Amino acid sequence: MTVRAAIVVTGTEVLTGRIQDLNGPWLADRLLELGVELAYVTQCGDRADDIEAQLRFLADQGVDLIITSGGLGPTADDLTVATVARFAGRELLLDGPLEVRIAEILRTLMAGRDGVDFEAVMAANRKQAMVPAGAEILDPVGTAPGIVLSPTGDGPTVVVLPGPPRELQPMWSRAVETLAVQQAISGRTEYRQETVRMFGLAESGLADTLREAESRIDGFSGLEITTCLRRGELEIVTRYEPPAAGAYAALIDLLRDRHRTELFSTDGALVDDQVAALLAGRRFATAESCTAGLLAARIADRAGSSAYLVGGVVSYSNEAKVELLGVDAALIDEHGAVSEPVARAMAEGALARFDADTAVGITGIAGPGGGSAEKPVGTVCFGVALSGRPTLVRTLRLPGDRSDVRERSTTVAMHMLRNELLSLPPD
Amino acid sequence: MTVRAAIVVTGTEVLTGRIQDLNGPWLADRLLELGVELAYVTQCGDRADDIEAQLRFLADQGVDLIITSGGLGPTADDLTVATVARFAGRELLLDGPLEVRIAEILRTLMAGRDGVDFEAVMAANRKQAMVPAGAEILDPVGTAPGIVLSPTGDGPTVVVLPGPPRELQPMWSRAVETLAVQQAISGRTEYRQETVRMFGLAESGLADTLREAESRIDGFSGLEITTCLRRGELEIVTRYEPPAAGAYAALIDLLRDRHRTELFSTDGALVDDQVAALLAGRRFATAESCTAGLLAARIADRAGSSAYLVGGVVSYSNEAKVELLGVDAALIDEHGAVSEPVARAMAEGALARFDADTAVGITGIAGPGGGSAEKPVGTVCFGVALSGRPTLVRTLRLPGDRSDVRERSTTVAMHMLRNELLSLPPD
């Protein structure tokens, strides 16, 4: 049976494109995992009439589940709960225990801040304790509670969640466990979803392989495949019903066969996950010029990275390369700051300065200025140094603008590092 | 008069979040510039019934203009034109000259490629030359033509554009010039839009001030205000018609009066813009522990930053703090790595090591581990050192998860840096 859902993202700042909506795509993934078909994602402004009209439209379309995000704050333009109540024909009631709970949260948040009038803040936040009659309350992660509203008549179940992703995501997990949501999604088709990642393959190369797969693999039509380029990597997501598992296995075999060097993940793991695992027990350091700390920050993004990340140098100026990393100034004079000898010296300098056993050096021209005929914008040199081995160096020309080149450089560095660490003999 | 528009983005890859929609935000900006109010941006999959239902809903809501993107390709799941024709009650007709034009484009594209059956490609692309009766054709930028359909009865004007942004954008410019679109948006109101930014103010504090503004400022209801939290800052965007300019000026006066220290931008400039201007002619360096390069990377994000960014040290380990920044190991033993004395020593160490005149030190506990009762997760110490001045230090407790704490720390550092630089006597 097909169970259909829709997402309504509220907020003028999202509608007008000033803030990128992260909740629609995230919730879309969660619905996909649940085997629920997504009919629409609609963004609308903080206007009650527009939100209510959209809810009525979705109910008329017979969707089983509506999820809203945003509009739960204390200000007057936060009106999602009142609008959902009107849509469902429910009265708004002050929930006493919830008001106490929100007061506790605010008291903790404001502890130690001077000059805050607690009563004024509580008055502003009282509206967050108003909930539609009969609604199930989802405890706040920030200060805004969510609600789950079971259907009125044959209407949809409505889940109301706050806008900030770090609040919405855990609250969605709780919403899914409620009886109202479980009833709305009962009887759905079971789907599996698998993710494969590749690096260094053009989209058209993958398209060729998929055409071959279509003609060679029995039951290929049972695989719903979407591909996209993300951070310089190709991500291939396949959704299928359990009987198509054989066709999926055949697809993976074909991808492995055709793209052995490019395929780096068949279990959804990111290169960041793989590098983190490979760095365990090691001492890692960075020497960054054009990326200016992005690689170190990417490595440090994982909890627990302090076990292997010793530190790094952002050597933006030539003096910093010489003074802090011990790069020979003559090397810079002879080859230029963006060159393989300098990338090598930076990586080896980081190895020495941080007493590390693994280091990466990056030096490049991110643009928009600084390019030349010989070294155009996008030219980036990489060095990967492992103690006791010759340092690997490589030069690439990366596409895109300043921000693309810097971001893409960290991805290239992650893959070079992964390959070098994988090539080490086992202990 | 308010002219309202809606955007319908089609494509299962967008709906499921595999591909980020860039057309909705881009078109939203263009509509804003035209003074057209945007009611909805809806993403729907490649399903004719869903698309048609959404078009009917929007027509029922009385929108004057609908813009669709995507679904114009040669494959079977590209069905926007046929769906729009059915919605408008128009027959689909083969446009002879358009078919010839598409053939020319394809012949050019395929020139030099081997093994392509031109007739087969043309057959697949013939459907792209089928247009609703009475439609105005927008010449293709890629291979897909767009169309503009003037209203049937009192319905909306519909503009149908291809999905790839580099095709959609120039074709939108042509669409705006057509008579049907000009008629749809004639009589629209002129709007102004202004942005104010604050730092260090809670949303509820702003809500109080806005309530006061509502009761004190004549014509306040003519201001359409949206507020949002972004990177730890409050962004307040106000849209108004020219006669409400006086009310807007009164609002700014009130904000300045109530939140002098928190209000840092009334012209939309980001703190990054302001810091970049203040750093001109200086030599800036960073010393980062928990942010591990994020601050240096944020500074380097601007083109031209190499004029003032000398470099930085990511001193993730204590040894790195001692070896590379010259922090006294006894200081770490006595106060802990996350302490104001260490933040001060890091900033001053960066000043010395990079021969800089401006430096920031950041050391904190980003979590999830590493917190204690005395120094819980989110505790971050900052030091801002300007040569010839006592170093400013401060400790904050920042909310959120690891990634929030690290990101927020860079924003705090930017504001501390801005304030210190602003407090310098003029040259």
Image: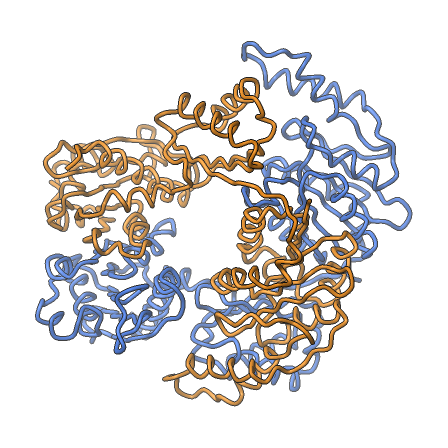
Chain colours: A orange, B blue
Q: Is residue B250 visible?
A: no
Left or right of A268 in this view: A73: right
Could you say which quadrant of the image residue A155 lies in? bottom right
| Camera-side residue of B128 and B216 | B128
Question: Considering only vertical position in the picture, is A381 above or below A47?
Answer: above
The quadrant holding residue B289 is bottom left
Position of residue B316 measured from the top left corner of the image (x, y, whole percent): 21, 58
Quarter of the picture containing the C terminus of chain B is bottom left
Q: Which residue is located at x 63 percent, y 29 percent?
A: B142
Q: Quadrant of residue B79?
A: top right
Q: Position of residue A277 (x, y in %)?
A: 27, 45
**Residue closer to the observer: A305 or B306:** A305
**Percent position (x, y) of residue A316?**
25, 49
Q: Give percent across and percent down for residue B199.
A: 44, 72
Position of A335 with respect to A57 (left or right) is: left
From the viewer's perspective, is residue A66 above or below residue B74?
A: below
